[in-house]
Amino acid sequence: MAHEWRETGDTTWSTGSTITFPADSEDPDGSGCLFHLLTDRSPEAVQAHFEDDYERPVPLDAIRHVLAGHPLTPAIALALDPAVLSDNALIRRIAAHPEVASYLSCDGEFDLARTDPIESIALPNGLPVEPVAGCNAGGTHYLCGPAVPDGPRPVLYTDSEGRASLIAESLAEALTLAIVLPSRHDALAGFRPPALNSDYLDDHPDHTAVRDRLLTALRLPSAADGEVLGRLLTTAARTVRDGFLPHVRDEEESTFEPTLEPSAK
């Protein structure tokens, strides 16, 4: 059996005939596996290929999202490879990158060393909450729901003034939010571009470079302000509807107020 190849810069094809493949193999040279997706680019074919390769389910909606050329989001990245953006993997990466940890604890208002909330809270929907980070203003971020290996948990933020809001559908999204949109609290109060983030950018003109560097360190997809703001507002809007507006544990009359304001400034 002869084989041909042509390397970059070659002017002619090279051939060889010394490779012996096992006679009982259904795909002796691998061409059946390698070339199949060149002839069938349907989402279903791509899904079947990767499910066979990864030996686990791969969501068809996530594959369609990528094949359509849409921007990669933390949610899509998580659907395609849950382990790489799992809570534990992200926390390990933060610990391994001092610049990331320093930014999150200060400008990002997502300090993983502050996991002692002022008061214990409970959710109307009965999901457990786990403090994961605090902020300089006395607020606390919680992961909501049971800890499932490689499974995302929504992130709830409560401030020191008795307000609360869902801010992200996963820890990966919450970290993206903290890095890309440091003025996220203003967004929940009704501020929108160009006013949103303007003061921060005046004080930190290198924010774009820092943002890209930190996202890369955490293996998070790149994201623009508008995308992140849209996800924040969509998630925050379901705080009350889906039972995520907390109350102080054992005090049913101590329900927090929703942070999201309907009016824009």
Image (cartoon, rainbow, N blue to C red):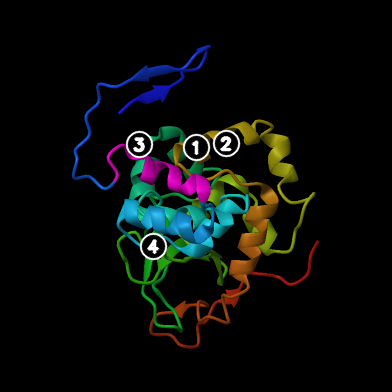
| Label 1 secondary element | helix
Give the vertical position of 230 relative to 26 (above or below): below
| Label 2 secondary element | helix
* Mark 4 or mark 2, earlier in chain: 4
Residue 131 numbered tag: 4
* Mark 1 Cα-neighbour bin, 10 Å: few <14, some 14–19, many ≥20: few
Q: What is the spatial separation of the Cα atoms under label 1 and label 2, in whole angstroms?
A: 6 Å
Q: What is the spatial separation of the Cα atoms under label 4 and label 2, in whole angstroms?
A: 27 Å
Please identify the quarter of the rendering in which residue 190 is found: bottom right
* Mark 3 Cα-neighbour bin, 10 Å: few <14, some 14–19, many ≥20: few
Image coords of residue 217 (percent x, y): 45, 36
* Mark 1 or mark 3, earlier in chain: 3
Residue 34: in magenta span: yes
As shown in the figure, which amino acid type bears the numbered disc 4?
Answer: Pro
* Mark 4 Cα-neighbour bin, 10 Å: few <14, some 14–19, many ≥20: some
Q: Is there a contact, CB below 8 Å, between mark 1 and mark 4? A: no
As shown in the figure, which amino acid type bears the numbered disc 2?
Answer: Asp
The residue that label 1 is drawn on is 216
Residue 96 numbered tag: 3
The residue nearer to you, when weighing 8 against 104, is 8
Q: What is the spatial separation of the Cα atoms under label 1 and label 3, in whole angstroms?
A: 13 Å
